[in-house]
Image (cartoon, rainbow, N blue to C red):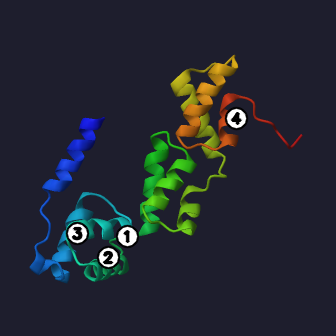
Amino acid sequence: MATACRAVRRRRADRKPIDDAAAADPAAARLAALKLLNRRDFAAGELKGRLLERGVAAETAESTVGQLVREHFVDDARYAGHYVTWHAGRGQGPVRIAMDLREAGIDAATIESAVDARNPVWRERCAALRRRRFGAEAPDDWKERGKQARFLQYRGFTGDQVRAALGNDIELDE
């Protein structure tokens, strides 16, 4: 794991920054932003941070990202929706996904509409992940229950979702 992190840092360090003359040039900043967007979708805050890493002046980066938002090249709601779909499919829960989106600079209202942790589908995803990881049988002893609960909480599921996946969900409708 440590070697993979070093490799990523090395690749980022090897990227050529924009030279001092082009740091305030909007055309150079736009070109750098479009090259980044060509690889994957970014949130506005993430894209601005990447441009700043490359040496673009702060006001130029801000105006460039603002222009790209107005042209719909950058859309935080679209980014959040894709992020939720991808990471939920990889077995991550709503708490962890929401935290990652908050770190990416997405506003709370957009996160709430994209994640919707109260949706019953998250309980089903949590239960499916538990079955895939630990088997179809519910855990018998407290030690195994704790192990499975910690795993599911680490993945970002709420306590209610974990309890439902472990088979001791209390129905209040009765």
**Secondary structure at numbered mark 1:** helix
Q: Residue at x 36, y 81 (%)?
A: 70
Query: Looking at the image, is mark 1 or mark 2 earlier in the sequence?
Result: 1
In the picture, the quarter occupied by the N terminus is top left
Mark 2 to mark 3: distance in Å? 10 Å
Q: Amino acid at mark 2?
A: Val
Q: Residue at x 64, y 41 (%)?
A: 123
From the image, tell me which residue sits under label 4.
Answer: 163
Q: Which mark is residue 65?
A: 2
Please report contact status of discs 1 and 2: CB closer than 8 Å, yes or no.
Answer: yes
**Secondary structure at numbered mark 3:** helix
Mark 1 to mark 4: distance in Å? 36 Å
In this rendering, the label closer to the viewer, 1 or 3: 1
Q: Quadrant of residue 38?
A: bottom left
From the image, tell me which residue sits under label 3.
Answer: 34
* Observer-nearest of 59 and 114: 59
Mark 1 to mark 3: distance in Å? 13 Å
Q: Which mark is residue 12?
A: none
